[in-house]
Amino acid sequence: MLQRFHLPLLILLLCGASLGLFVHKVHGLGFPLLPAQTTDSWIVEARISFEPTGGPVTARVFVPGEPRHLVLLDEHFISRGYGLTTDQAGDNREAVWTTRQPSGRQTLYYRATVAQLERERQGSVVPYPGPVNLPDLEEPYRSAAEAVVQRVRERSADITSFATVLIRDMNNTLDENMALFVSRNHTDRDRVQTAVQLLAGARIPARMVHGIPLTDRARDLQPQVWLEVHNTREWVAINPNTGAVGYPPNFLVWWHGDQDPVRLQRARNPQISFAVTRNIQDAVDVAQQRAELMDSRAVDFSLFGLPIQTQNMYRVLLLVPVGAMIIVLLRNVIGVQTFGTFMPILIALSFRETQLLGGVILFTLIVSLGLAIRFYLERLKLLLVPRLAAVVMVVIMLMLMLSILSHNLGIEHGLAIALFPIVILAMTIERMSLVWEEHGPADAIRQGIGSLAVAVVGYLVMINPYIEHLFFVFPELLLIVLAMTLLLGRYTGYRLSELLRFRALRGHP
Amino acid sequence: MKWFISPKALRRRGVVGMNQRNAQFIAELNPRRNYPLVDDKLLTKKLALDAGIAVPELYGVIETNHDIRNLARIVGEHDDFVIKPAHGSGGNGIVVILGRLQGQFRKASGQIIDQAGMAHHVSNILSGMYSLGGRPDKAMIEYRVHFHPMFEGISFQGVPDIRTVVYKGYPVMAMVRLPTRDSDGKANLHQGAVGAGIDMASGCTTRGVWRHQIIDLHPDTGMPIGGLHIPGWDRLLVLAAECFELTGLGYLGVDLVLDRDRGPLILELNARPGLAVQLANDSGLGQRIALIDAAIGKNGQPTAPASARAAFAQARFR
C-alpha cells in the first residue's frame, strides 16, 4: 500500500510545497509574475525649518506611522548636529530632534520611500474609543446643533452615512441652522473642525486627518485635511468636500488631530513643506523590501541576497532543470534519438550566446568539419584517447579560424562561438563518427538532427524571458519540475516514435 | 494507408514499448549486479562452459596493447576466426575473417585487411571504442561459426542467429536474424538485418520484417523466408531457458547460432533485448508475459526445470 502511494504522495507533496510558497510570494508579497515589471513608489520629503531663539532646541515633528494601504520602504532623517528619537504620541508617530547650540535658521529633512501594498494591512485595528461627550455649546449654537443632528439623523442609516450626509449638508448651506456653523470663507480645516464638533453632538468619535496625496511630481505641497469617524469597528475616512467615503488611492496619512505638525521649544517661525516624486522601481525590489518589512521568511532564502555574479550564474543554471525535463519529455514520450543524454542541453545553453540561427549554423559547421577531420585521423590509426585529444585540438582551431573569419567579414556571431562546450563537441564528433561507421550515415545524420532539434527546442524554452524570470524569482517552481520528472519517470506508455515503429503490426485486429 | 498505429491498437495487441520494457522488465527483473555476467562476453562464455552449454571456442584474449603482438600467435593456423570486443554491444566492433589471401586476411564483407589493420582494430577495441561507456576493453579471438546450410539462401554474408527473449526463465518469443547487404553482415535489425518470426510450437519461420515493412522474400537473395524448419528447435528452446539460471536475469535475450558441425551454440546474452522481435512475429510480448505471470504468480519465481519451461512455451505460445 505504502509502496503504491509513495510516489504520488511525494509528487503531491512537492507540488503542494512549491505552489504554496509560490502563491504566498505572488499574492502575499507581490512578487511580479512577469519580468521587467515596475511598481510605483514615491519619495516623499518633508522640509522643516525654524529659527532658534537661543538655548537647546527641541523640535517635535509628526511623521507617517503605519499607513493602511501603503508601506514605508525606507526612511531617512536628515539633520546635522541633531539628536534624533522617534516615538508614539497618541495617534501619531513623532520624530524628536534635539540640539544644544543651533545658530541661524535651521532646516531638517524627513524623507521616506512609499509603495503601495497589494492588500490592506491587517491587525492594526484601533479599538472603539467609546461615545464622546457632548460638546459644551452656548445658545443659539446648542439648539442649532441639535436641530442639525436631528435633521441628519433622519436621513442616515449608520455612523458612516451620518457623517456623509452631514458633510453634504455643510457644503449646501440652505439650512439656517447649518448657516450658523459654516461660512463661505471657511478653510477645509475649519470645516473639518466644525464637523468634528457637530459629530460630537451626535456622540460620534471623529478626528481630523492630515495627509499628502502622492502625485507624479509636486513641490511645496500643503497637507490636505480629511475627516475620519469611528464606526465602532474602525476609522472611516470621509472627504470633507464631498462626503465620499474612503481615501483616494495613494493618499499618505501623515498625522491625526488638529495640532500643528511641528512643535518647537526655544525656536519660532516653524515652516513645513512637502514634496513628492514618483519613482519607478523594479517590482522585484519593492516586493523584496516589502517582504522584509513584513518579516516574511520567504525572502531569507531568495536568490536576491546573493552577489550579482552568482545571481547571473543561477539565472542560467536554474534553466538547466527545465532543459533536463524537456529532454526527458522528448526522449521518453516522443522518442527522439540524441547523442548523449544531456549534450543537447549544453548545446542549447551555448545557443543563448550565439543566437539560434548562428548557433545552428556554427554547430553544424564545426561538427561536419570535425567529422571530416575525424575520418582522416581514423586513417592514421591512433589510439582512442590521443585521437579524442586531437579532435579537441582541431575543434578549438576550427573555432579560432571561424571566429577570425567571421570577425573579418563583420559577422559578430562568430565570436560567441568560443562558448560552445568544446569537449562536448569533440565527444559528439567522436560518437557521431562511430555511429556513422557502425550504423551508416543515415543513422548518424538522423541522430545528429535529433540532437540539434532537441537543442533548439531546449533553447527556445530556455531563452523565454518569462520562464527565466519565473524560475529566478520563484526557484520553488523547480520542485514542480522535479515532481513532473518523477511522474514521467513512471511513464510506461508508448513513445510517439513507437507508433511509427510498430506500424507493421497494424494489419490484424 | 495510415502511417502510424494508434496506441489503443498497440495495447490491444499487447505490444511492449521501450518505456515499459525499461521500467517493468529490465529495472524490476534484472538485478544490476548480474549485468557483468552478460556484458562481459568472456565471463558469459566461462559460465556457459561451466554449465555445460556449448559456445564458440575461444582461441585467445588480448588484454593490453602490449599483447597485440601475440595476435598472430593466437590466430595460429586458423584460416577463419572472429575478433570481437568482450564488452561490445549491438554487434559493434566485430570483425569476421573468412580466410587468408597472400598473408592478408579477407573480411566477411569481402574487404582485405592486413596484419597492421587488424592490430589497429584490436587496439581500438582495447581502448574502449566499442564498449559501453568507453571503458577499456578486452579483445576476444574465437571460432567462426559456420552456419547451418538451411540458412544458405536467406542470409547475405555474416552469420544468421536466433534471438530468443526469455522472461523469468520461459522462452517467450523468438526470431531468426538474417544479415543483409544493408546490415553489412550484422544481425541487428536496426542496422538493416531481416527479422523472421518463429512459431514457438514447431520452430518454423513465419514471415520477415525488414526496415519496418513485412517481407516474404530475402531482400538480397530473393529466397522465401517463411516455412523453414529450424533443426533441433526443442533443444534450442531448452538451451535458451537454461540461460536464466546462468545469469539470474528475468528479462533476457539469448542469441544462439546453429553451427554446421557443432549444433546450437550460445553466441551472447543480452540484458536489454530490443523489441523488434514483436515486429518479426507480428505479435506483442504482453499477452505471453501475462500467461507466464498467471502460471507462476506476478512476483513468483520459476520452479519448473528448463525443459518444462520450454515445453510450456511450445504448448501455450502461438
Image (cartoon, helix red, strand yellow):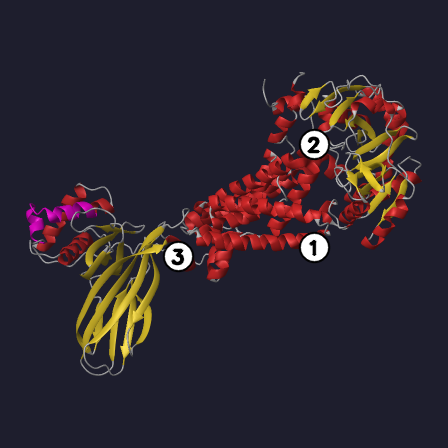
Nearer mark to the viewer, of 3 and 1: 1
Residue B304 seen in the figure: no
Q: Quick one: quadrant of the N terminus of chain B? A: top right
- Say whether disc 3 or disc 1 marks the residue closer to the N-terminus: 3
Quick one: A312 or A8, which is closer to the camera? A312
Does dot 1 land on a helix, a strand or a loop? helix
Residue underneath mark 2: B190
Residue underneath mark 1: A386
Quick one: A247 or A214, which is closer to the camera? A214
In 3D space, how far apart are the residues under numbered discs 1 and 2 (Cα atoms)?
31 Å
Q: Is residue A325 above or below residue A52?
A: above
Q: In the rendered structure, are the residues bearing label 2 and label 3 in contact, judged by CB atoms less than 8 Å apart?
A: no
Does dot 2 land on a helix, a strand or a loop? helix
Quick one: A133 or A338, which is closer to the camera? A338
Residue span colored magenta: A163-181
Magenta stretch: includes residue A167: yes
- Horizontal and vertical percent position of residue B260: 90, 28
- Horizontal and vertical percent position of residue B63: 83, 51
Q: Quick one: quadrant of the C terminus of chain B? A: top right
Q: Chain of mark 3?
A: A
Q: Is residue B223 above or below residue B166?
A: above
- Horizontal and vertical percent position of residue A85: 33, 72
